[in-house]
Image: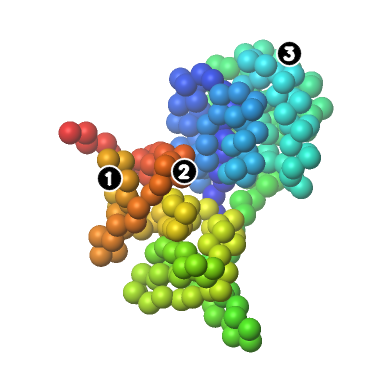
Amino acid sequence: MEYTYTIIDSDATSNLQLQHYLEDYGDFTCAGLAQNSTEGTNTILKYSPDVIFINLNESAYEYFHMVMELHQYLNELPIIIGISKSKDYAYEAIKNGFFDYWLKPYNEFDIRKSILRLKKQVPAKTEPQTLCLKSYRDFQYINTDDILYLQADNNSTEFVMKDGTINNAYKTLKTFENQLPKNFVRIHQSYIVNTNFISRISYGKSYCTLKQNKMQLPFSKSYRENIDGLKNLLSKNTISALN
């Protein structure tokens, strides 16, 4: 179980500092970064993060309007935490349904109390691990952890499993794009990959290599943003050795 989050803040240093604090908890994963309310809205609607952190010093009332606007598109808003150098916007933040309000410079103790309260009040969602493929009166159940990737085949989809078997579903790839757990990412018009099996991303040749049999899957320019997010996620807890 984990929480995904988005930070809306144009200050790169502040972003890195907040991500560093959240790494201490182990179950917080960055779903995306945004520099303003327009980017923020797009990132929230695209990645559906569980928690949003907003730097209110930059344009507080624009962000309050953004939060109100999100009600038009979402049945349930994410947890929202406001960040500011002063208490000037605290009342408005609470009135707009913010979960908490943090003051800069960050105070590790205050963050810890807030995160623990968040975990107690809003338990992380457990994503389903079993997928049911239905065809007429036939029901096939597969464990999502065993799926290497999905491949489009005209108007049907092939599920390629880690043991080499292939399961077919008579639905388009688009049907499954938002139904699978968050570790499945669309990288191409024809492919959705289980990121747990990726061992390499080659920007020069535009392909991802899987741990299983060193299989290579292409990615396209139209899904470059997904690849960038995937690279950042995979690089988060790695030791970097640049040539």
Figure check: 161 above or below 10: below
- Kind of residue indicated by mark 3: Asp
Q: Outermost residue, right direction?
A: 95
Q: Which of marks 3 and 2 is in front?
A: 2
Left or right of residue 57, residue 237 in this image: left
Colour setting: rainbow
Q: Residue at (53%, 31%) from the top-left corner?
A: 33
- What is the secondary structure assignment of the residue under circle 1? loop
Figure check: 157 above or below 42: below
Q: Name which quarter of the figure residue 230 lies in.
A: top left
- Could you say which is closer to the camera, residue 78 or residue 37? 37
- Kind of residue indicated by mark 1: Lys
Q: Which of marks 1 and 3 is in front?
A: 1
Whichever of labels 3 and 2 marks the residue nearer the N terminus, that label is 3
Query: Looking at the rendered structure, which numbered label has been put on residue 205?
Result: 1
Q: Can residue 207 be seen in this view?
A: yes
How far is mark 3 from mark 2, CA to CA? 42 Å
Q: Outermost residue, left direction?
A: 243
- Could you say which is closer to the camera, residue 182 or residue 214? 214
Q: Position of residue 7 (x, y in %)?
A: 56, 30
